[in-house]
Amino acid sequence: MRVYEKEKKLTKVVCNACGKKMLVENGILKEECIHVEHDFGFFGTRDGESDSFDLCEACYEKLIAQFAVPVDKKERVELL
């Protein structure tokens, strides 16, 4: 969950799974976090809905450990 000030400055990020408050300084998230935004389209029960959530790194690892098909991991050489 993300909280912004009036000028769209990020003020708070909380893991939706465990409730951990992540470190935000001067509008910048200073920890690793998975942010998901999804707009549901047609052919489902949630047509027209939009969801967003944040997961801390530990909760992300717990989530993907449950997958029947593992995530496709690649190592990036350049990070910028």
Image: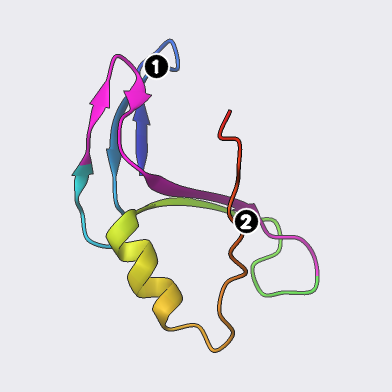
Residue range highlighted in magenta: 22-42
Please determine whether, in this image, residue 68 is positioned above or below residue 24. Answer: below
Q: Quadrant of residue 55?
A: bottom left
Q: In front here: 10 or 78?
A: 78
**Residue 69 position in % (x across, y down):** 59, 85
The circle on residue 9 is: 1
SS category of the residue bearing label 2: loop
**Residue 70 position in % (x across, y down):** 55, 79
Q: Are marks 2 and 1 in contact (CB under 8 Å)?
A: no
The circle on residue 20 is: none
Horizontal arrangement in the rendering, residue 43 relative to residue 19 (left or right):
right
Q: Residue at x 58, y 64 (%)?
A: 73
- The C terminus lies in quadrant: top right
Q: How is the protein colored in the picture?
A: rainbow
* Residue 31: in magenta span: yes
The single residue placed furthest to the right in the displayed view is: 42
The answer for how far apart the CA atoms under marks 2 and 1 are is 25 Å
The single residue placed furthest to the front in the displayed view is: 77
- What residue is shown with label 2? 49
Horizontal arrangement in the rendering, residue 73 relative to residue 17 (left or right):
right
Three-letter amino acid code at disc 1? Answer: Lys
Q: Residue at x 66, y 74 (%)?
A: 45
SS category of the residue bearing label 1: loop
Horizontal arrangement in the rendering, residue 71 relative to residue 57 (left or right):
right
Q: In front here: 78 or 56?
A: 78
